[in-house]
Amino acid sequence: MDDLIVKTVARLIIPFIQVYGIFIVMHGHLSPGGGFAGGAILGASFILYTLAFGLHKGHKKIPHEISSKVETGGILWFIFIGFIGIWTGHQFLTNKEAGFYMGDTGRVISAGLIPLATFGIGGKVASTMITLFHTLIEEDL
């Protein structure tokens, strides 16, 4: 797309969208949102970049190799966090019983392993959205 207004607005708004997506991921255990919602917002920001600047620049910003590594790393991180509960002799994704620091209610450092698990979910969702969009748009070309 060669529209100057779309490119300028996208260039201005994408950083704010990404900061908001990271905020949603980080505060998902305290407020509505979390890994899925924040990951969807982050993925949508990169999709907006691809729509505004073209598929070639979108691939340069997030190559498929990086997207697939983030996708794999996100799910492996989530599984690793879940297995900590099993290694401590409890159930998968056990939180307080596994000895995680629960922190103070209402603070960012609280809820044990839940914030750590949402980082994995956020990365997985964002990279999956980017990969699916790029795959679908490549088929149309």
Image (cartoon, grey):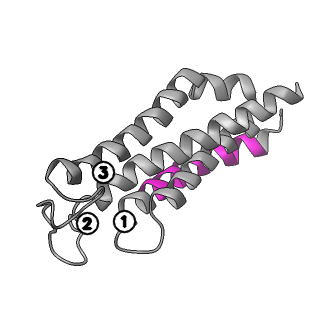
Along the line of sight, which residue is nearer the eye, 63 or 97? 97
Drawn side of residue 117 relative to residue 46, left or right? left
Asked whether disc 1 touches disc 2, contact meaning CB atoms under 8 Å apart, the reply is: yes
Find residue 115 and report its horizontal and vertical position in percent.
31, 59
Closer to the eye: label 2 or 3? 3
**Crowd around label 2: few <14 · some 14–19 · many ≥20 (10 Å):** some
Q: Locate the C terminus by quadrant.
A: top right
Quick one: SS at disc 3? helix
Residue where numbered disc 3 is placed: 82
Q: Residues under labels 1 and 3: Cα distance?
A: 20 Å
Q: Quadrant of residue 30?
A: bottom left
Q: Which mark is residue 108?
A: 2
Query: Does label 2 or label 3 sit earlier along the sequence?
Result: 3
Find residue 88 and report its horizontal and vertical position in percent.
13, 52
Residue at figure coordinates x 15%, y 66% from the top left: 97
Q: Which mark is residue 101?
A: none
Magenta stretch, residue numbers: 6-22
Instruction: Indicate the amino acid at tag 2.
Output: Val
Residue at figure coordinates x 55%, y 45% from the top left: 126
Q: Residues under labels 2 and 3: Cα distance?
A: 20 Å
Drawn side of residue 81 relative to residue 139, left or right? left
Closer to the eye: label 1 or 3? 3
Q: Quadrant of residue 77?
A: top left
Query: Does label 1 or label 2 sit earlier along the sequence?
Result: 1
- Main secondary structure found in the magenta portion: helix
Residue where numbered disc 1 is placed: 27
Find residue 112 and report its horizontal and vertical position in percent.
21, 63
